[in-house]
Image (cartoon, grey):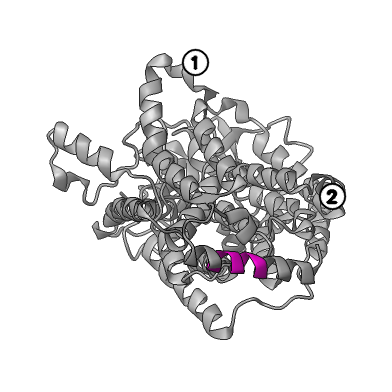
Amino acid sequence: MSADAGRRAGDEAAAGYAQAREHPRKPRLSLDTALGGAAPDRLLLACVGYLLAPALIFAGGFFAWPWALLAVTAGVAGFALTPGWRSAWPLGRGATLACLAGGLAWSFGCSGTHHLLYAPVDWQIRDAVLRDLALGPWPVGYVVGDVVRLLRAPLGYYMPAALAGRIGGLAVAEAALFAWTALGLALVLALLLALARQVGLRARWLVLVFLTFGGLDLLPNIWLDVTEGWGLASYWGRGGEWWARIFQYSGHVTLLMWVPNHALPAWIPALLLLRHARRAEFLRAVAVPLAAATAWSPLGALGAGIVAAVAALTGGFWRAALIAPANWLGVALAVPLGWFLAAGSSAIPHGALLAEHGLAVLPRLALFLAIEFGIVGGITLLLLRSRLLAASLAMLALLPLYVFGPGNEMTMRTGIAPLAVLAVAAGCAVQLSAGWRRWLLAGLLLLAAAGQGMEASMLTRPAWPASRDCTLPEAAAQSVFDATDWSHYVVPWPEPELLPLLAPPVMREILPEAMARCWPEGGG
């Protein structure tokens, strides 16, 4: 599709939405027609570069030179073939500055990177990973008594900050992680603003829906607190998205507070797909950002990749995508990244949900699906037509059937991208539709926002300082998650599968009898 054709398609979609507003009895609006036709531009390049830079730093620092050369060359070449170089930045100077300021504010308020506000206990481990990457050579290994382990986790999120720390020290690394998170959130805001402009939406309302999007967790939490005698006030400052106990779809406030390293590499590709999914030139290079996202969050990238595959198949671009050089360069980047992350993964808990919990889990599963996305998704589909949304809802329904990782990472992380699609679709539906269903959806989104507000109430708890002395094994030994075996963070070394791939690890000896006390002033 040419640039002129793309602009005509966008104009036709906007005209169709304007007409639908004037005549609410028209057939359901097509979100796939309204969105997806934006020509690749420099915002796309900025997003791809943001995802790609950490993957290249990681590959250059961890892999043996032949594999490092392959990965870095493939990544750089794939970026060079990404479309958008001749197009302009889609936002004005004022809007761009507003996105940057919003990213800084969003990162300060929710990301947990700076410890000036309360940080959830996941940051005990995350701080240790950043410290170990910032203060020593790569790859990182540990010797604790007779046990030798290699740090083997998705490390992309940390790599730019860790590189800054290698140069300027740990304080610089911590500041850089905050800034890097803020930049990613600024790109998310810019994508939302660009999407709103494609269909004439009020951007602030779409942004507000996205920022506060989540399930209807407030309802089961109120029920549990009342029936179990804890009282309504017990939800404040506690958080409560684990009401279903064995699976979770995290709301957007929860994601940013606990796992920005998983949220950003799923949100950005999902929003890029919503902007460009009907453009063949975008789908001919879509593997590059998806491969780069693998270094951040393999399951988050998997969710976005499934949505991308649906876009290519339903749009008729799958043949062009399969033979595109940029996509094969993305595959060349993804192979060593996937090799690193898959080695030793059989030790991570996994299996079918029904095999583990039996048929007795089905009523809880049905309630979980309805509360977390089913009700909102169903009403949104009554207001809008969208194959991407329908595929995203189907994916969300199927993901809980397979358990992978502590806390069922398959559900929590792979579901981030399809939930982002639902958030945008709901934000569009509530502005562009009419009738009682629109107001019902608006009420449900307000209820979801209230639940995310309760999640944010954790920020009222006292802040605790990051430990600058605690390595990953020490943090894991003192973590509140004392039942976790941490096989998703480390593997025994030497690991035969990784020997050909990695540069020689630098082992750090940690004496079990002299382990540092990580958080003398708190920590969760």
Instruction: Find the magenta span and give its range.
Output: 11-18
What residue sits right under mark 1 in the picture? Answer: 355
Marked residue nearer the N-terminal end (1 or 2): 2
Q: Nearer the viewer, residue 61 or 190?
A: 190
Q: Are marks 1 and 2 in contact (CB under 8 Å)?
A: no
Q: Position of residue 350 (x, y in %)?
A: 54, 25
What residue sits right under mark 2 in the picture? Answer: 320
* Residue farthest bottom in this picture: 93
Helix, strand or loop at mark 2: helix
Residue 142 appears left or right of 342 = left
Residue 229 appears left or right of 54 = left
Helix, strand or loop at mark 1: helix
Q: Measure how far apart labels 1 and 2 are at the Cα level.
A: 40 Å
Q: Nearer the viewer, residue 124 or 307?
A: 307
Q: Residues within 10 Å of mark 2 (few under 14, many from 20)?
A: some
Amino acid type of the residue that numbered disc 2 sits on in the rendered structure: Ala
